[in-house]
Image (cartoon, grey):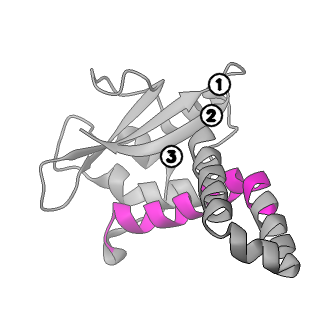
Amino acid sequence: MLLPKFLLILIVLLILVIGSRYFLRNKFILAVFLIAAVLGILFSDTIYQAFNGKIMSYVQSPQGNRMPFISERWKNADSNNPADNTRQRMSGDLINKYKLLGKTRTEIINLLGESDSTNAFRDWDLKYYLGSESGTAHPQWLVIKFNENDSVDDFNIARN
């Protein structure tokens, strides 16, 4: 979650350097820009979370192919069957309705079941096979990372 803040700070500094002559002549524009930049930096995690969830739900599955997240169906999905895309179809609803950030490991396992086995994504703590993207052979995974307090620090839809 540090990356969005870092990128935002870098963009703000770049704009300040490039536009410094203009900003120095117009104090009002400088003040408005600095206030917006500070608010953006303070709330970058929230903004990232909101947009990431919304964007990922549209990226993951075609409009008519989504299905609501149901914990038991997710747990019973056949992760050994590449043709079973039940989890992929539920992933948008899961991300949008069940705010994963901050949930404990126990809450995640109760919700999604035990992690699937894979040698990929070694930096992530839990991995759930979603299925292959339609029309491709690239499997998608929901990967989850926990912080030192054992609560979700980051998650992503990854491909291998």
Q: Quadrant of residue 32?
A: bottom right
Image coords of residue 115 (percent x, y): 42, 27
Q: Main secondary structure of the magenta part?
A: helix
Give the residue pinned by disc 3: 71
Q: Amino acid at mark 3?
A: Ser
Q: Amino acid at mark 2?
A: Val
Magenta range: 39-62
Image coords of residue 83 (percent x, y): 16, 50
Q: Is residue 21 left or right of residue 28?
A: left
Considering only order in the chain, which callout, 3 or 2, is on the residue closer to the N terminus? 3
The label shown at residue 110 is: none
Image coords of residue 80 (percent x, y): 20, 34
Q: Residue at x 58, y 34 (%)?
A: 108
Q: Amino acid at mark 1?
A: Asn
Quarter holding the N terminus? Answer: top right
Q: Which residue is at the front of the view, 78 or 55?
A: 55
Give the distance between the C-alpha atoms of the residues marked 1 and 3, in whole angstroms. Answer: 24 Å
Image coords of residue 68 (percent x, y): 48, 63
Q: Residue at x 60, y 51 (%)?
A: 10
Give the residue pinned by disc 1: 147
Disc nearest the viewer among 1 and 3: 1
Residues tagged 2 and 1 counted as in contact (Cβ below 8 A): yes
User: Which element carries disc 2, helix, strand or loop?
Assistant: strand
Considering only order in the chain, which callout, 3 or 1, is on the residue closer to the N terminus? 3
Give the residue pinned by disc 2: 152
User: Which element carries disc 1, helix, strand or loop?
Assistant: loop
